[in-house]
Each structure stands twice: as structure tokens, then as C-alpha cells.
Image (cartoon, rainbow, N blue to C red):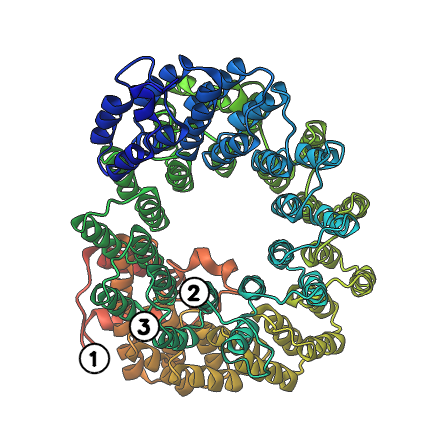
Amino acid sequence: MSASPSAAIATNPSLSAVIRRNAGDPALAWLLFKRLFLSSPSSSLSPSAVSAISRILARANMVSELERIHRHLLLQPCPTSSSALVALARSSAFFGLLDFCLSILRSLRSLSPSFPPPLPLINSMLRSSLRSSRPDLVQLIYRELLLAGAAPDVQTLNILMQSLCNCGHLDDALQVLDKMLVKGCRPNEFSFGILISACCRAGLNNRALELLERMGSQGCMPNIVIYNALIARFCREGKVHEAEKLVERMREAGLLPNVVTFNARISALCKDGKVLDAYRIFKDMKEDYGGFELPKPNQITYNLVLGGFCKRGMVEEAGALVDEMRKDGYFVKVESSNIWLSGLMCTGRLLEARKLLEQMAKDGLEPTLHSYNILIDGLCKQGMVSAARSVMGLMRGRGILPDIVTYSTLLHAYCLKGMVQEANWILHEMARNGCVPNAFTCNILLQSLWKEGRTWEAEILLKKMNEKGYGLDIVSCNIVIDGLCRSGKLDKAVEIVTGMWLHGSAALGELGNAFLGLVEDRNGSSRCFPDLITYSILISYLCKAGQMDEAKQKLLEMLGKNIKPNAIIYDIFIHGYCKLGRISSAFNVFRDMEKKCHHPSTRTYNLLLWGFGRKNQIKEMLNLVDEMREKGVALDATTYNNLIRAFCEGELTSRAASLFEEMLKRGIRPKFASFSLLIKAFCKAGEFDSAEGAFRIGLASCQEKGALYSLLTYELCKYGKVLKAKELFQIAFDRGFSIENFAYKFLIEELCKENRVDDAKNLLTAVVNRGHTFDPATFMPVIDALGRKGNNQEADKLSEQMMDMAARHDDDSFHQPSRSYGNMNGSKFHAQKQAGSLENDWRSLLHRDDGSGIVLKVLKRVQKGWGQGSIPISQSRDAELCEMEDHG
């Protein structure tokens, strides 16, 4: 019996070729297909014709047309339609039409219940589901496979394991591997590779190594991809030794490390700050000096080394590498330019950054949003917020819209400069431009408002965050709690933390404002419960307030909530107890910390040393230092300072000096406090040569050189070495050090007491001539001494200068009450006791009754126009002088 004309047409391969030739016009291809193949409901469709048209339609996402072919095939005889349905399903799966593909799969099952769908089709559908991130369909298709009675092969199970791993169900994936042999499938290197990579991503390195061993026992050889996954993981964690052992194992297995292997090592070195080591490997790869056939560096290698240089601030080396990259043709990607731009901006090389942007334009590399964000971030870090704002306008002009990173960077910069109003404008601008702020952005402003003490505005922002749906996260809650504690509302902070366990962030409504009652968690599952940071804040402020029992209650509470305290919380308690002088309690906390497997840090030991030092328990301090050495805990400058302070206060200067020498030998750079302790102790003991020796070492190694001059000047003066003090002051003065914190008033007084009036007058004149403004009382000892010597002309001249400075002093104090006029009474380390009397010091000296009355007489002469002539003074000053004369 001859075939019907329609069937002949449907099976004609040349007609399928006609359809394929019109693949560029899916609508025309469909029209031809309908006329040629679907003219009659009884027309039979060949698999080749279905394959040709279905690929065209699936690529164009013409699902309704595909469904028509599906319905037509269901009307055909089973053997023919099954093959065509498989072709239709395969094309649909390839182009991601998975739901439609699943309906075809069910049609196949219903048409041929005893014949399962072809396994290649199932695997194609599974791969497409995996590519589309549809783990639900992977599970569903796998179940359909089992229901159809088909046996999965190794490829099927590999896809299933990959899907499970992508969803974080690693244990389920490992169970699939265990059952593969039971199902008659032998795992291959891809099976193990999937699981080893997943274990590495999850940080389960030991499990990954176990799988590596299992591969060998099952006769499956690891490939280079598997080794690289493991090596990269160990390198990221800084476990270089383990990574190197794997490289050796690779070589023994006959696998040479490739560029991916070397990139992992270079990345780890750069992350660890060992950029020069990374660069040496890079050079070896590039030049292959030893003839080891090392892989050549690729774009990623160059970028890793460049990023390493830039992050370490090694701009010269980075610049040389950029030149090398240009020469080798590897500086053609915008990613490389962005890395270099970031390095230039971080080191403040703004001109070079501008030139780079110009060069990018010449090279046809259009700056991306990331490029502009780097530029804005760098300008903000340099304090150039206005310039950063201008860059944002420039990027808009080039059609690049700012994103949340751009706005957040600017907002943060404004907050750091205390420009909260401008930060608020940024937040509103974001919303106007359709860039929805997230909790992170709002939290930046929220923290700034609390720090500025603008509590009401902070509460308004909380309300708006809630209304706009930005969400209040645990960071928001912690900012509020810290702000309350900072502003002295510790009880309210404790109350809110308690409420958070019941209501989440809705507990912030307890701040007291009616509108804040709106703050609530819309989703109970996302409630903000107190975390480790929350309790750290509360406990810290409770300890600072001396409320140790309340702090201990909070510690018990967090333990009851299964929040484990970290080393920082233990340190907070130790500091709190030491501050109150309860050293035994602090030591108990310290021992409990060790029992809970929190290894005490250098900071922890330093807190205890500070506490013992306050009690002058030197023996206990030395025992503690011995323990540090035994346990391998590093001693730092603070450790030595605690010991040196204790020895100095105990007048054991020789032992303090020995410790200082030990500190230097160990390469520990002393802080200013170290020199301060020694210089004070040596001067007090009359060991001035030793004090000067410490001073000279300080000048060579300490940045606070002006403070060192100030300190030694005061100490020499204090213990009777006035001439040496004057010489030292003169050196500092001549070298241009700021003398604001020098004790030159004290020095002038002591010079006058030793009858060195000329030295005192010359020093005072030099300070005045340099343009310094200071407490007018500084003139009085010199005026007094000159008057006693009968040198009325010089005394009158200084008195005029004193009155003029007094007038300016009072005017400036009225207009700028917070202005500092220099610490005339000594350096900042010993002037606090006199800080309150600076304003009226010169007037109180006028009222003194020491029998001489010289200063008052001089002032009267000046008022009457004697000596160097009168000076204009305000009416209030006239009244004061008349009053003084009446009481004289």
C-alpha cells in the first residue's frame, strides 16, 4: 500500500532543510511548516521535521506554536509520535522551556507506560534545569524517571548531586554517592569532583581529603580540576603547607600544575601581604628561568599581582607592573584599569588617577559604574566630598546612574565630616532617583545621628525606615542600643534588649515616642533578636558604669539564650574589675576564660598587668609575664609600659631601664608613654644624664618629638635644672616646634626665682615676638623682678604689653570661649590641675599681698601715662583698676 501524499511530504528530508534555511525568521518558518506539515489533522510528522521547527520555535520562545505541535503529535500513532515527541522535548529542554518539556515527558509516559523515556532526554532536561537554577525541577524530573522505571546512569546522578550541592544539601549529595554502586553506577572523576568542590566551598576540608582518598580506592584518578579546587581552598585559608603537599601529590600522579594552580598560590600570598613572594613566582612563570616548564601567566595572574601591590600601597611597583602589562598586551581590560585606579586613589595620587581615566578613554575603555565608585570612594577618603559629588554629576552626564554603593559612600563621607544634613539629602535623593536605600545605607546615617546626639532625628529616621519598608536589622537595633548607652540611658537600653526577645525590632518602640510604636517586624521569622554584639555593648557600658553585678546577670542571660561569649566580653569584665580594684575577681574571670577554651590574648594579659600595677603588685606582674612567655603570647609596647610604670612608681629605675633596653633589643618600638615614664622617673631620682639619654633615644624613634621636648623641659625645671630647661626650650623654639604645650610660664617663674631676670625677659620677649597669645599672668614674675631691680622703664614696657594682651585675651575669650591660648602652666601631661584657673590667673596675681605691691604700682604709672605712655583700655577695665586701688 502506497503512502499518502501528506505522509510523503511530512517525511521528505528536503522539506525539513527548507524549514532550517528560514531559521532567521521564526514566523516565516512556522508559516511554511504549517502549510507543509499541518495541512491535515491526520498528517504524520517525522522526528527530523519536528526537530528542525522545534529548535527554531524554542529559540524564539514561541511556546503556543510548540504546544500546537505537541497536540498534533498526540493524535498520531504511538511509535511515530513517540520519536517526534522526544525530538520536541529535546529542543525545548535545550532552550530552557522546562515546564513545557515536563508536560511532553508526561505525555510520553502515558503513550508508552511500559517504555521509559530515553535516558539522554532525561539527562538533557536535568542539565537544563541545573543551568536555569531550578532545583525543584531536577527533583521532579528525577522522580518522573524513577516512576517510569528507568535506571539512572552516572551522568544522571552527577547532575542530581550537583543540584543538591548547589542548594546546600551536601549530606544528601554524599548519600547519593554512597548509593551509586548499589544502583549499578560506578562514580567517575566528575562525581567526586562535584562533591570535593562542594566540600571546599563549605569549608569541610577534611571531608574533601577523605573523598580524594576514596577516589583512589575505587580506581578513579583525580584530575587537575579536583586538585586545583583543594589547593585553592587551602590557599584561601592560609594553609600553604597543606596546599604544597597537594601540589607534590599532583606531580607524583603525573599532573603538572597549571596556571590555575599558580594563581591560587599567588592569590593566597597577596592576601597574606606577601606580595613580593607572589611577584617572584609571577616572574618565574613569565621567564621560566629554571626550565621547569611553568605555565605562562594569564590575565588573572597579572590582575592578582597588581591588586596585591595596590592593596599594600606599593604604588611604584604597581606602576612598573602596569607598564609591563601594557607591553605584554594584558592592560586591555577595564578590570585591570579599575584595580590600578583603586591603588592610585587609595594613596592619594589624584593627578595620576585623572591621567589614567583620560588614557582609558583614548584606549576605548569606557569607565564602568565600578570605576566611578572607586573614584568617589577615593575622593571621600581624602576628605574631598564636594569633588566626589561632582564626579557623581559627571557619571550621570555619561549615562551611568549611581547605585546604592555610590550613594552609601557619599552618605558615609558626609557623616564622618559631621555634615548630617547633607547626608540626609543624599538619602532623599536616592529615593527620588529610584535607588531604594537598604538597611546598610540607613544605618550609616542612623549611627551618625546618635553619635552627634541628635536623638530626635534618629528616632524620626527609624520611623521612616519602617514606613518605607527598608527594614530594621540587628545592626539598626545595636546602633540604637549603643546610642542610648552613650547618652546615659543605660536602663532604657537594658529594657529594649529584654523586649527584643519578645518583639524583635518592635521593642525600639519603647523609646518613648508614640510614632515609634509603628516599628514592628512584618515577618516573625526575620525578627531581630539580640546577638553577641548587642550583649557586648550592654556589658561594656555596665562595666564602665561600675555595675558589675548587672553585667554578670547579662552574661548569664546570653548564656541561657545559647549565645557564647567571646574573648572580647571576657576582656571587658577583666577591665571592669581591674578598674574597680577587684583584682581577684578579674583573675577569676581570666582563669574561667582559659577553661572555656578562649586563649587569652596579649590585650587580655595587658589588662591584668594594668590592674596589678595599680595595686603595686610587682611580683604578680612578673609571674604573669613569665606565663605569657611560656604560652607563647607576644609581649608588646603596652606590656612593657605596664611593667616600666610599676618599677618607676616603685622607684626601681634601674629595673625599669633594663626592661626598656630589653624592649629595644626585641625590636618593639616604644611609645611616647615609655619615654615619659622613664624621663619622669630619672629626673625624680636626680639621674638627669639618664633622662637625657632616654630623651635622645626618643628623638630618634618617637614621632612626638615636640612632646618629648616639652616633657623634659618641665621635668628639668621642676627638679631645679632651670638653665638646662631653658636651653632645651630654646632649642625646641628655634627648631620650630609648637610650644603650645610647653611649661614656659613655669620656666619663666623659676628663672625669676633664681634671679635670672634677663634670661626670663628674653624668653618672654621671644615668645611674644613669635606672635603667641597666652595668659597675661606670665608677664608678672618678670615685671615684679624688674621692679625690684629698679628697672622701671623695662617693667613699664612689659606692663603695657601685658595690658594689651589682657584686652585681646578677654575679647577672644568672649567671642571664642573654647579657644586654647597655649598651656602656659606646663605640658598637657601635668597641666590639668591648673586648667580651671587660666582665665583669671593674671587678675588673682594683682590682688596678692606679698608686701611688694610692685606690679600694682607699675600698672598705676602706666595708667597715668608714665614710662612708655598710656594705652587705651575699656571702661570695664578702668572700673576694675579703680576697684583694686580702693582695696589697696
User: Any mark on residue 299, and which?
Assistant: 2
Q: Determine the image quadrant of residue 841.
A: bottom left
User: Any mark on residue 258, and which?
Assistant: none
How far separated are the C-alphas under marks 2 and 3? 60 Å
Element at badge 2? helix
Q: Which residue is mark 1?
A: 868
How far separated are the C-alphas under marks 2 and 1? 81 Å
Q: Is residue 2 above or below residue 701?
A: above
Type of residue at label 3?
His
Q: Determine the image quadrant of residue 537.
A: top right
Q: Position of residue 77 (x, y in %)?
A: 44, 15
Type of residue at label 2?
Gln
CA neighbours of label 2 inside 10 A, class few (<14), some (14 to 19), many (20+): some
Q: In the rendered image, which quarter contains the N terminus? A: top left
Image point 54% across, 78% down: which residue? 284
How far separated are the C-alphas under marks 1 and 3? 22 Å
Q: Position of residue 486 (x, y in %)?
A: 50, 39
Q: Is residue 477 visible?
A: no
